[in-house]
Image (cartoon, rainbow, N blue to C red):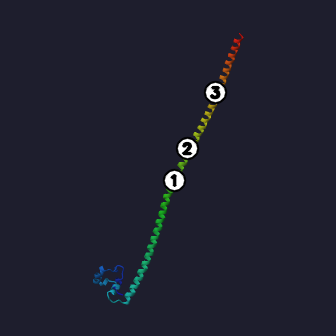
Amino acid sequence: MNKSNVDMFSENNVKPYNEDNEDELRINSSTVPFYLKNAKGQNNNDEDVESFQRRLDTLIVNFRGETMAEFMRTKKQLNNDSAQTLDAERRRFNTLLGVKQNEIEQLKESLANKTKGYEELNTRCEVMALWAGKAKTLLRIKFIQASAFNALKSYRDFQIHSRRVLEHRAR
């Protein structure tokens, strides 16, 4: 196999076929791959076919390897991205959890303070109710004492009046 055939199948020399570069291919026929020469009616030998098959097999194997390597890199990158996303979410949620736990602790403290205040107010209310009850009882006692005193005074006045009436009749 000569050097021109080897160069003809190199990766740098293979260009995709389209109608725009057909004229260029006719002018520079030394760089045209053999499969395009065949399409133009030029002869092809067995070495070119074997060389092309080997090159095609190599390209397929390389393509498969590169594809698998790219797939594995992509899969690894996706796994890394997933792990990073999970870690970021975990950190975010741990932060939110910490904030909520602090809020719960503050609310518990506030509840405890308010409960203590309410207990103090309740105690004060009970003391005031006790004093109000005692005052009411004392007022009743004073009222009963005043009623008794007035009744005794009226009785005494009646006794004095009765004595005077009896003395007046006795005269």
Query: Which mark is nearer the camera, 2 or 1?
Result: 2
Circle on res. 100? 1
Q: Is residue 125 shown to the viewer in this render?
A: yes
Disc nearer the start of the sequence (3/2): 2
Q: Say which residue label 2 marks.
A: 114
Query: Which mark is nearer the camera, 3 or 1?
Result: 3
Disc nearer the start of the sequence (2/1): 1
Q: Is residue 95 left or right of residue 6?
A: right
Q: Residue at x 62, y 31 (%)?
A: 136
Q: CA distance from mark 3 to mark 1?
A: 62 Å
Q: Which element type, helix, strand or loop, lies under badge 1?
A: helix
| Image quadrant where residue 14 sits | bottom left
Q: Which element type, helix, strand or loop, lies under badge 3?
A: helix
Crowding at label 1, few (<14), some or many (≥20) Cα neighbours within 10 Å?
A: few
Residue 135 sits above or below residue 70 on the image: above
Circle on res. 143? 3
Residue 155 sits above or below residue 48 on the image: above
The C terminus: image quadrant: top right
Q: Residue at x 48, y 60 (%)?
A: 89
Between 127 and 32, which is closer to the camera in this rendering? 127
Q: CA distance from mark 2 to mark 1?
A: 21 Å
Disc nearer the start of the sequence (3/1): 1
Q: Is residue 90 left or right of residue 48?
A: right
